[in-house]
Image (cartoon, rainbow, N blue to C red):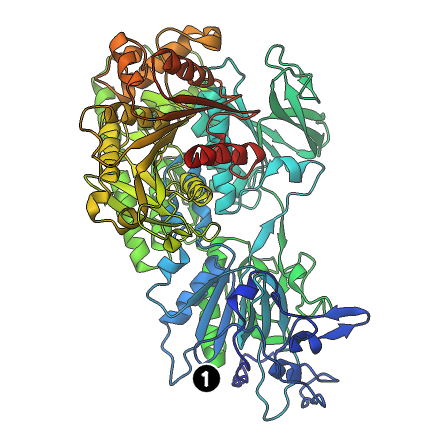
Amino acid sequence: MSCRAAPWGRPSAPRGRPFPASARLHSPFGGMNSWKNPVLKNSWRIGDVPAMFGLPSGLFRCMASNGSGDAGFSRPQSIDEAPMPLYPWPDKQRPRVCILGGGFGGLYTALRLESLVWPGNNKPQVMLVDQSDRFVFKPMLYELLSGEVDVWEIAPYFTELLKNTSVQFVKDSVKLLRPSDHLRREPGVSCTGGIVHLESGTVVEYDWLVLALGAEAKIDVVPGSAEYALPFTTLEHALKVESELKMLERGRFGKKSPPIQVAIVGLGYSGVELAATISERLKNTGTVKAINFQTTICPNAPPGNREAALKVLESQNIQLFLGYSVNCIREVYASEDSGSMVADAKEAGGGYKKLVLELQAAQRGLQSQVLEADLVLWTVGSQSQILRLQPPDAPYVIPLNGRGQVETEETLQVKGHPRTFAIGDSAALRDPSGKFLPANAQVAFQQADFAGWNLWAAINDRPLLPFRFQNLGEMMTLGRNDAAITANFIEGLTLEGPIGHAARKLVYCLRMPTDEHRVKVGISWFAKGAVDSLASLQTAVASALSPPTTPTTAPPTAADAATNRCAMDPDSEVAFDFPPYLCQYKSGRVHRPGGDAIAPAGTDPLTGVVSKDIHAGPARARVYLPPDASAAAAPGRLPVVVYFHGGGFVVGSPARPSTHAYLNDLVARSGAVGVSVYYRLAPEHALPAAYDDGWAAVRWVLAGGDGADPWLRDHADLSRVFLSGCSAGANIAHNMAVRAAAPGAVPEGAAVRGLMAVHPYFTGKEPVGAEAAFGPDVREFMDRTWRFVFPGSLGLDDPNVNPFVTDEARAAVAGIPCERVLVCVAEDDVLLKERGLWYARELKASGYAGEIELFESKGVGHAFQFDQLGSGEGVKLQERLVEFIKK
């Protein structure tokens, strides 16, 4: 086809009133009476199937042709002009560009369009649609598991990236595509390029369309894979894997359990990078089992990258199963006593779940294998989204190849659709040798640049450029301080180890979407790198001053290679390991695996709760207001819940997404004002810093926010203040109640009405209840962790963590001013359930005059509610807390 595009015609303006937002929440036609709705009145049929996709009148004119080719259109004899649920473009004259998908292809195309110089009034209105509110720099998802990056660095919000542009971002999913640019145009009549139906019910009429939807993970390949395997292609997948790893690490703590076993299916780039990252994270606490159909890893990678990757995999605790395919995945239960596997949980006698992978030999000479795993990650297979988005009456209107990818011209225009472009994983484009271009970020980067230019050229009636992919090289991460880079412009050059790692991060920093984000990320990574460099220098000096060791004459083994590899890594000299929360090295550097995602304050779309971050005296807090607070009849109507998050005093914050969602739900259910406290974390700020911050926030609340905060001033009933927390947060809440018992601690007119201790963190030198079954190593670890977060304490005899250790401490607890105390425990909370029960018993025996309530969640573990908030037990726990607040 010609590379010169026809001039774009000004589509007819949408007619009728905008579609009401309230109706969009339900369906494309909301709660409107379908018999009176003129859109449905004019819906047409395909055979006996109604096709109720209310099409704009201009589009009806375009689609009314009885033939094909370049002849004019025939018009329908009569079509009622009906109000349509159309997206309201701000400008009626300028071109409308709709970009579907906010990955590398979609976002960078939008930014490219914004950067170009447009003549006259031709600068288009650009709309970017994505189902997530974050752009995800996918090549660095692995660093979330290793803790090298934070979520905000590689997954910034679209609104933040586009705030200085005219690009309009819409968070939604695509439901249906109806292009019309393949149809004949009637002379003198303007028509659109087509319409897009979104899942919210919004209909978007556009002049130009960019398909950048990418591909979805395809894991329903073998029996059990969809049920038990996790993909790793999105931010949600990465956070889910991080959560699963933390649960496995936490579940093994304090128990003589076998090592954590992680199975990874597929050893392309993604599988290799996952295997190296997870193996390095687990160290000697787990094993990675990597399965690949072919007998080589990364078969399409440059030899230098493949050799570097194989060297790393063989030096770590990774078992390679090359030449195998997975036949099925099933779930069994392992008995803790005998280790035997059974299919029924009851027969296991309270054991733990295991996944079994049956492997089939794909190469001659290999025998079938059966593997056990605690976690299965699936990195092979993907599927295009375009096939399911085609209209049911015209399933092939967008040409697709056998893999479901869109067939495109060299100009990136979809074949037969001059106003539709397809890029990234959505597009099928070949290199000069006839091979399909790889579905990676580098291709999408370059296609976005060409797509933006060709849209400019098409809108301005200029020649379009054919896309030519320039392969600059390939990169892969192989651990916290290791990577491999092969540059195509220097034959035979592969950068490995720390140099490759630094070069990879530099390239990706420069590839961040905006200048502002590049600067922020660059400063953050530079600061982290400076700390790492200092740690390396200290380690090198320590090694130089240490006495020489006698060399061994035995040949080095794979284990020796792993040991030598760790010896060169400054992160290998661990001063204190506090799984799954953090690891502190001898250099003083603190590593918190997985970082910590941030949920911004604002209006929660699910509950309507509004939140904001403020200064609470010398401390900081996130304050929550229930959705009906503005309807309060008078000030002082709502109780106040002061909440302290958990995390062993070393991790967490009110902005952690799970904590933020939990507070939104609790505030919405209870109708209380919520105050979630930011407290300083150990070891950077050892206890009693967290206690001091907590008390400052409590005092601020009891003083009505010093009269300066309108939410507390106008809505809080200071005579109904409740202290609450989970795990270490429950410990803080308890200690705040003890401080509140001091004379003059609570201002006149205010009162601490109740204490809600959920899965409280207490311990002691002497075991209680089922703790007698713990080995001495558990008690010793509890003592070390407490001294780690509170170096100046008395160890496990400290009243802060053992509140009934002395008569004086017992009397202090008995005097807490709360009328009621609710203690919540979890049935499967191995470490802390007995201490929660003990706390309730000892509180009653201490002479405390108030009411004590005990609630147990069945079949769940410690702090389960954050990952299972909507589960049956999660709802029961929330309802019990709400009942306690409203009582």
- Three-letter amino acid code at the position of disc 1: Gln
| Closer to us: 110 or 607 | 607
Residue at the extreme right of the image, as rendered: 48
The spot of residue 477 in percent (x, y) is 43, 40
**Residue drawn at point x = 53 percent, y = 62 percent:** 212
Side of 154 where 431 appears, left or right: right
Let me know if residue 409 appears in the view.
Answer: no
The spot of residue 55 in percent (x, y) is 64, 76
Asked which quadrant contains residue 687, the reply is top left
Q: Quadrant of the N terminus?
A: bottom right
Badge 1 density bin: few <14, some 14–19, many ≥20, Cα 10 Å = some
Q: Is residue 414 above or below residue 586?
A: below
Q: Which type of secondary structure does the marked residue at label 1 adopt?
A: loop
The spot of residue 149 in percent (x, y) is 36, 41
The image shows a total of numbered marks equal to: 1
| Closer to us: 695 or 42 | 695
Asked which quadrant contains residue 44, the reply is bottom right
The spot of residue 200 in percent (x, y) is 56, 62
Q: Quadrant of the C terminus?
A: top left
| Closer to us: 103 or 31 | 31
Side of 710 where 55 appears, left or right: right
Side of 329 where 420 appears, left or right: left
Q: In this view, does 104 lie above or below 256?
A: below
Q: Mark 1 points at which residue?
A: 93
